[in-house]
Image (cartoon, grey):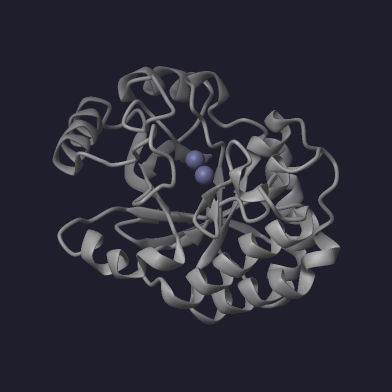
Amino acid sequence: MFDYHVHTHYSNDCTFDMESYILPAIEKGLKGICFTDHVDIEYPSASIEFELDYSKYTREIKRLKDRYNGKLEIFTGIEFGMQPHILETDTAFFQDKSFDYILGSIHTADRKELYGGDFLAGKSEHNSILDYFNDMIFCVNHFKSYHNLGHLDAVSRYINSGSFEASKYMEYIEEVLRTIVQNGKGIELNTSGKRYALPYFHPEPSIIKLYKQLGGEIVTLGSDSHSPSTLGYGFDEAAEILQHCGLKYYTIYKGGKPEFIKL
Ligand SMILES: [Zn+2]
Ligand SMILES: [Zn+2]
């Protein structure tokens, strides 16, 4: 299988170098991996900068592609943090760069970070979650460069444990999914949820089912690994979930074009 969500030391929150993922990926029987390091422009934290040295990054991936040719397929991606107020960056950042895959993720709500809980300050949990989904609706309507939307319900990691009920937000989630389908984009099934002590991956099955009902067919699989030990985490179960939701294929991207692989 292909793991399309892998971080390395090019991400501020990860210390492992790229090459340290290669042998574990082969040993786990993965056919390929896509590096998706963070680019979070104007991330609202003074101590964290998520920028990327593009030429160094792509050179390193090219070196590994050549070195492990025939053993592991390696793809160039990024996880792009989308926020409504950085919309103009969407075209500016990408105009002189190319990636196999761009995962668009929401890591903030109303310009405050999810991680650490700043987005909850001075508001009810409900209103904070609405900020998150309203940002997401704006971004899927206006951003053009991303391919798939990352970990759609990841906000559930950052509120009181167990208190997130997707059914309360389904009209917002449906708007997100309808827009994604209309624009030919996809979603990600991100298996890290269970590593955050949640009972499901991101997004939970009811959301994947709704995506499929609305005509969605494009789902990448990603472990969101920040360590080689979690590559391909939960992928057998993830494949079963997708089948259970009515999907027959999962998706990888090469040069920005989706390819479908039978589950
Ligand atoms: Zn993310
Ligand atoms: Zn990630």
Q: Residue 79: horizontal and vertical position, in percent?
A: 41, 48
- In the image, what residue occupies the spot 85% across and 41% down? 162
Residue 171 is left or right of residue 140, and the answer is right
Residue 244 in view of the camera: no
Q: Residue 160: horizontal and vertical position, in percent?
A: 80, 40
Mark count: 0
- In the image, what residue occupies the spot 56% across and 65% down? 136
Q: Is residue 94 above or below residue 171?
A: above
Seen from the viewer's position, the closer of residues 27 and 178 is: 178
Residue 189 is left or right of residue 228, and the answer is right
Judged from this view, the residue extending furthest toward the front is 122
Seen from the viewer's position, the closer of residues 97 and 48 is: 48
Judged from this view, the residue extending furthest toward the bottom is 182
Residue 136 is left or right of residue 52, and the answer is right
Seen from the viewer's position, the closer of residues 80 and 131 is: 131
- In the image, what residue occupies the spot 70% across and 41% down? 157
- In the image, what residue occupies the spot 68% across and 41% down? 158
Q: Residue 70: horizontal and vertical position, in percent?
A: 30, 32
Residue 112 in view of the camera: yes
Q: Residue 195: horizontal and vertical position, in percent?
A: 68, 29
Q: Quadrant of residue 33?
A: top left
Q: Is residue 245 above or below residue 47?
A: below
